[in-house]
Amino acid sequence: MQKTPLPITAEELIHHFTLEAHPEGGFYKRTYQSNQMIPQSALPPEFLGDRYFSTAIYYLLLQDQKSKLHRIKSDELWHFYLGGPLTLVGIDKRGAPYEVTLGQDIQAGQKLQHAVPAGHWFAATPTVGSEFSFVGCTVAPGFDFAEFEMGKRDQLLLQYPQASELISNFT
C-alpha cells in the first residue's frame, strides 16, 4: 500500500529546488533557457541585446510576501503549481488595474495559467489565507535582468491615478 505524501512546506521547496531571494520579493530559480538565441538585430528596438528564445523559473512567495510592481519587455506566462492561490495584479496598457487569481479551484474562477503581456506593470502576493504560493514563469523572448524595471510609486501614481490603491500596495 502506497502512503499519501505529507504536504510539502515552503521551506522544503526552497531547500529542494535551491531557490534564491529575488530582487522583486520571494524566491526563485531559473530552470530553463533555450539553447538558441535571437540576435538583437531580429528583436524590436527596445531589447538591449541578444535573447534566448525562452526562459523559465520556479517562483515562490511566502504568506504576506509581495512581488513588487515591475514590468519586462517580453510576455510572461505564469503557471500555478503548489500551495495556496496567488493573486496576480497588474495595470494594462490603458492604465486600468486588474486582478487574476492563480490556483487549483477552477470552478471558483481560479486559473492554472495566466499570460502577462509585455510592458504591463504587474505584481503578485499569496491570496489571504495561503501559507505560500509556488508557481512558474515562462518568458519569451527570454528574460534578462537588464530589462527588468521596478515601479517607482510617485511616477506610477502620476501616470495611472485610477490604479492608486494597487500602486500603493505593491511599491
Image (cartoon, rainbow, N blue to C red):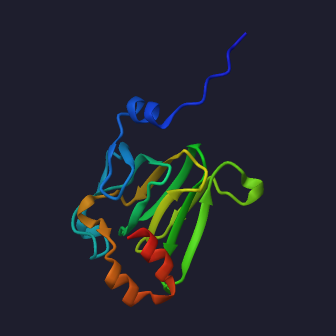
- Report the side of 59 relative to 49 (left or right): right
Can you give x and y, in whole percent of width and height, for residue 11 in the image?
Answer: 44, 34
Viewer-proximal residue among 6 and 40: 6
Q: Is residue 120 visible?
A: no
Number of numbered discs visible in the structure rendering = 0
Residue at the (58%, 42%) spot, across then down: 83
Q: Residue 46: in sight, yes or no?
A: yes
Percent across and percent down for residue 47 are 27, 70
Q: What is the x, y in percent for residue 160?
A: 44, 87
Front one among 77 and 165: 165
Residue sitting farthest toward the top? 1
> Which residue is more in the foreground, 90 or 42?
90
Q: In the image, what residue occupies the spot 32% across and 84% down?
A: 155
Residue for point 58% across, 69% down: 99
Name the image quarter holding the N terminus.
top right
- The reply, left or right, for residue 42 in relation to residue 133 is left
Q: Which quadrant of the figure contains the C terminus?
A: bottom left
**Residue 118 locus on image (x, y percent):** 42, 71
- Residue 45 figure quarter: bottom left
> In the rendered view, would you say 167 is above or below 128?
below
